[in-house]
Amino acid sequence: MTQKDILDFIKDNDMLKVSVVEKKAGIPTRSLHKALNGEQNLKAEYIEKLTQVLTPLGLKLKDKFKVISIINNKGGVAKTTTACNLGAALSRLGKKVLLIDADPQGNLTQHLGYKDPQFYEGKELSDIIEGKCDVNNAIIQYQENLHIIPSTTNLDFTNKTLNRNSGPSSYKLVKRYVIEKIEGEYDYIFFDLSPSFALITNDSCLIASNRALIPVDASEFAFRGINNVLSHINDYKEENPNLEVLGFLFTKTGRTKDMHKYKEALRSTHYRVFETEIAVRDMAYNKGPLIGKDIFSLFEDESLKKQEKEGIKKAMDEHTYLAQEIIAHA
């Protein structure tokens, strides 16, 4: 824990009385006051004592960077679309982003235009996990601040191999071979997970993550599966206590009259429900993958008609608002 972590926590918690905290921690009177006012630094022994007092009150080590798994065991809830366009939005807000395609279908990889597997042969997520390729050699620069690690159906074969030789270490391969090798190089890393909860690589990504983002559409079928998703995430919290549910994101809005009912029901779970909703915009979300572009890059296409641009602009605004919420809450 650093002095900044301590001071930020106290500043964010107005109910804490500095003098009481000093007394409980057994540090000199006004030493914390002076640190808050920038008059002096806290000694290492004071930081240790303050950490012991403040941790039960909610103080925790801030993540150096956010590793977010986008997860839902229901297909068609726009996981891949969210990963692609949220990553693009964050990159345009000055954040350095890495997208990792963790789905054997490789939809995220193809969405960004990497449709020919020969382009990244031997340099995809499966190769990294199997120790055949260093992560830094597999990263593709899609744009200046937006990079991707691709996947193909080879990831299915990797899962079969891991299933045959499954052990505790199998679940830590993504953390060991991916995250720990690039620690500090990105502001945000997103895993686009497969909807199948049976894949060891999915579980390995969750163990490597510190946040889970759950896209959900406003349908009875999707809502019934929420408890399964939350239960699956919680199964890995003992192994990875840093894993938290970042919140629920409503996608494909506009096709149901029951949106308010579903939002209130999700809020009753006490998890965050993002204010931003991603509406149905067929033009924005159908053409982009066909030509290998995110919505922000698609908007720059001069061949688009005015009406098409208007729809894409609305989609851009939604993902920019979402990116701002992610920055504020992740």
Image (cartoon, rainbow, N blue to C red):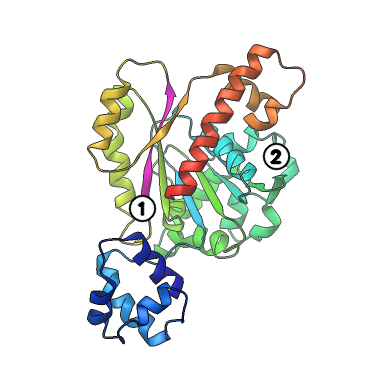
User: What is the magenta range?
Assistant: 243-253
Task: Name which residue type carries label 1.
Answer: Glu
Give the main secondary structure, helix, strand or loop, of the magenta stretch: strand
Q: Residue at x 29, y 71 (%)?
A: 54
Q: Quadrant of residue 9?
A: bottom left
Q: Residue at x 64, y 26 (%)?
A: 288
Tell me if I can see residue 153 in this picture.
no
**Other residues around mark 1 within 10 Å, as few (<14) / some (14–19) / many (≥20):** some
Residue 13 placement (x, y as % from top left): 31, 61
- Say which of 199 and 309 sits in front: 309
**Other residues around mark 2 within 10 Å, as few (<14) / some (14–19) / many (≥20):** some
Tell me if I can see residue 148 in this picture.
yes
Q: Earlier in the sequence, mark 2 or mark 1?
A: 2
Q: Residue 117 got which mark?
A: 2
Q: Seen in the image, is 66 located left or right of residue 286? A: left
- SS class of the residue under badge 1? strand
- SS class of the residue under badge 2? helix
Residue denoted by label 1: 244
Q: Seen in the image, is 23 located left or right of residue 322? A: left
- Height in image: 106 above or below 232? above
Quarter that holds the N terminus: bottom left
Residue 173 placement (x, y as % from top left): 50, 60
Q: CA distance from mark 2 to mark 1?
A: 34 Å
- Height in image: 105 above or below 162? above
- Say which of 73 and 112 sits in front: 112
Residue 179 placement (x, y as % from top left): 54, 60
Task: Name which residue type carries label 2.
Answer: Pro
Q: Residue at x 32, y 57 (%)?
A: 237
